[in-house]
Image: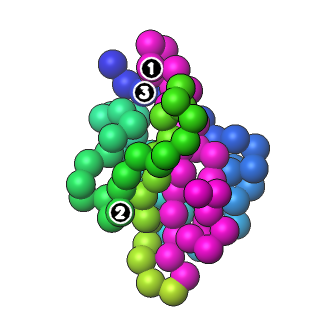
């Protein structure tokens, strides 16, 4: 069963502002999340769970390394219904972690 990947309004705006090359990588990540769930695998650079509140499951990975480095942050909203919410897409410097 596939997962549903949703974007917050803010993350959708951020994604629309990205270069086409970064958007293409983001699309690959979203496809991996839909097919495999919240852990996309070791092929994604710097993938890890983020520390936070006990009941939150937040994760991130780098989309493109370099200057600037682009990252994507997401949260597992509901494991039973299989919903993932992307809440940040953008440069590493402004990432909310």
Element under label 1? Answer: loop
At label 2, counting other C-alpha atoms closer than 10 Å, the crowd grade (few under 14, some 14-19, many 20 or more) is: few
**Whether residue 8 can be seen here:** yes
How far, Cα to Cα, is label 1 from label 2? Answer: 23 Å
**Can you say whether 65 is above or below 8 in the image?**
below
Residue on which the image places disc 3: 3
Which label is found at residue 29?
Answer: none
| Percent of width and height locating residue 61 | 42, 58
Q: CA distance from mark 1 to mark 3?
A: 9 Å
Residue hosting label 1: 79
- Does the stretch in magenta take in 53? no
Residue at 64 percent of width and 57 percent of height: 96
Q: Is 74 left or right of 34, judged from the image as shown? A: right
Position of residue 32 measured from the top left corner of the image (x, y, whole percent)? 35, 44
Where, by quadrant of the figure, is residue 33 drawn? top left
Q: Residue at x 33, y 41 (%)?
A: 39
Q: Nearer the viewer, residue 47 or 4?
A: 47
Q: CA distance from mark 2 to mark 3?
A: 22 Å
Count of numbered marks: 3
Q: Name the residue carrying label 2.
A: 46
Q: Is residue 31 visible?
A: no
The mark that comes first in sequence, 1 or 2, is: 2
Element type at marker 3? loop
The quarter holding residue 65 reads bottom left
Q: Relative to 3, does residue 6 appear above or below in the rendering? A: below
In front: label 2 or label 3: 2
**Residue 20: quarter of image:** bottom right
Q: Is residue 15 left or right of residue 76?
A: right
Split into 4 quadrants, where in the image is the N terminus? top left
| Range shown magenta | 68-97
Give the mark toward the camera: 1 or 3: 1
Picture residue at 33% right of the left edge, 64% below the top: 45
């Amino acid at each position: 069963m596939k997962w549903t990947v949703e974007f917050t309004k803010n993350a959708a705006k951020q994604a629309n502002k990205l270069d086409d090359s970064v958007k293409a990588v983001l699309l690959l990540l979203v496809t991996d999340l839909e097919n495999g769930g919240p852990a996309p695998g070791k092929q994604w650079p710097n993938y890890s769970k983020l520390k936070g509140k006990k009941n939150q499951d937040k994760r991130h990975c780098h989309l493109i390394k370099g200057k600037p480095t682009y990252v994507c942050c997401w949260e597992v909203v509901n494991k039973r219904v299989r919903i993932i919410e992307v809440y940040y897409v953008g440069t590493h410097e402004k990432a909310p972690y």
